[in-house]
Image: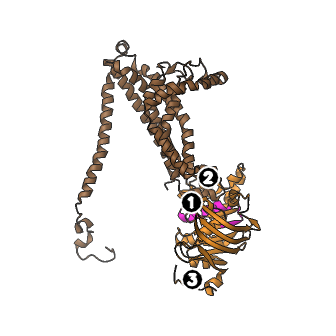
Chain colours: A orange, B brown
Amino acid sequence: MSKRIVVNNLNVYYGKFKAVEDVDMVIEPRSVTAFIGPSGCGKSTFLRTLNRMHEVIPGARVEGDVLVDGENLYGPGVDPVEVRRLIGMVFQRPNPFPTMSIKENVLAGVTLNAKHLSSSRKDEIVEKSLSGANLWEEVKNRLELPGSGLSGGQQQRLCIARAIAMSPEVLLMDEPCSALDPISTLAIEDLIQELKETYTIVIVTHNMQQAARVSDSTAFFNIAGTGAPGKLIEMGPTEKIFSTPDNQQTEEYITGRFG
Amino acid sequence: MSTDTLPESPADVAPQPPSSLIPAKKRIGDSVFKTLSTGAGTTILVILALVAAFLLVQAIPALTTPQDQQLANGYGYFPTWIVPFAFGTVWAAAWALLLAVPVALGIALFISHYAPRRLAQGLGYLIDLLAAVPSVVFGLWGIIVLAPAMMPVYTWLNAYLGWIPLFGGQVSGTGRTLLTAAVVLAVMILPIITSLTREVFLQTPKLHEEAALALGATRWEMVKMSVLPFGRAGIVSACMLGLGRALGETMAVAMVLSGSDVITIEILTSTNTNTIAATIAQNFPEAFALKQNQLIAGGLVLFVITLAVNMIARWIVARRAQYSGAN
């Protein structure tokens, strides 16, 4: 179920402003790829182009190709709604639907595709997804309660369960731990290690230790200055990026000289 | 003060209140603001109490006078006399709400989530402008334009759906029916429901909308999953405000309907149940003594109906508070 992503010559715009310039990248299946870089360098913006969430913002557009197993997400006639059903996303702040129960939250995406699921099939999906997100044991006795009653870390794992319930090809995570405490963060990081057995995972993080802990390869983004577009500076195996990067800017960033 | 050190003297045991260390300063701005806001809050309570007291005192004769005297000197025995008008009030307002809410929600959603920004703004102003039209103008429009224009619709409804009691009976020849009055009322309450729900829809957290979109929801599915549930309480409140206005609206109904005290659910005939507000407005100039008291007691009943509607709305909103977007 996991797929290789190839990005060719991608430029991202907000209206006239060029936010990300000329990115070429290969993201391997069944691995964790981390995007690091200073604030405003376009790493989140770039992540959102991988499931066409970017264009939700008025005036935003993209030039270039994103190939998922050879199929261009920005090809003519490709429905962004279908793209998002195949490429799941987890956001910076946990965002379970406040009016839905835990169970309804898990099923929210699934029921968009299949309106009529038998209740036994639903239960199966709920248990599988919540177990997959390491949340089942904590919530199995209160599936009917609102999802917003959970702790922040639990809510984020509920959001991961909601995303993997749709059996996506790829899972994008936009700083999934930045609103969480250290223990919850650890729980999510462990979960990412388990999920990469099945999914292609791309994670944006501000936390370099986290990138070093969870990812197999790391991409470093940077900007030349305010108003300049973000660029992919260097990408490679995480060990190499954090020990002997090729680029001077990467070295300065990971050694904490700026950012 | 740490608890593991032993106290030297009794004075150390009792923690000093910080106020004795740093005396609070009197600030003029604070006290002026406090006085003003407290005064405003008190005024509204006093006004409400005065109105309620007026209603109660003036209504008492209508409620306490024996039945035979009421029949002789008044419009009739109050508890039975008021029933048709109470029904007419609720009936007309309910139809107005039924007609207005889907349209209002549609416009609000269009403005907040579908229309291009420039068009949305213009449309918003236009809706607000609708709220500025005086109700007497709406009444005139109802009589002169709407009533004749609706005639073919009424005839059609009566011919094909006349077997439903609602559309049965002899169609009015003038078009001045309860449905016409309800349409006029609906147009009048449309702006308030639209602008309130639009504000609520605009406040849907981006986070919830993106959650739905990222799951592969279409625009409409996103609205269903995040915007409408988040706005639920706001929608109910907006509807109740609209309903409150429809219940109390006098001019439009008084002008369009020639109401009677017959209870009928037929909405296309020339026999229509009058509303409390219209009854009061039409009869008060000639009313005296007990009749006056009865009309004021009618106002009291209207007050109670409106209050009940608001309480029900609050109860609906509170019942699902834990599911609201607030937590």
Residue A181 marker: none
**Amino acid found under the numbered disc labelled 1:** Asn
Establish if B155 lies above or below B316. Answer: above
Image label count: 3
Disc 1 and disc 3: Cα gap in Å?
Answer: 31 Å
Which numbered disc flags the more N-terminal residue, 1 or 3?
1
Q: Is residue B135 magenta?
A: no
View extreme (right): residue: A70
- Residue at 67 percent of width and 23 percent of height: B160
Camera-near label (2 vs 1) is: 2
- Residue that numbered label 3 is attached to: A254
- Residue that numbered label 1 is attached to: A95
Quarter where residue B280 is shown: top left
Name the element at disc 3: helix
Q: Are marks 3 and 2 on the same chain?
A: no
Q: Are marks 1 and 3 on the same chain?
A: yes
Q: Chain of mark 1?
A: A
Q: Taking A194 as reference, is B259 left or right? A: left
Rate crowding at label 1 as few (under 14), some (14 to 19) or many (20 or more) other CA atoms within 10 Å.
many
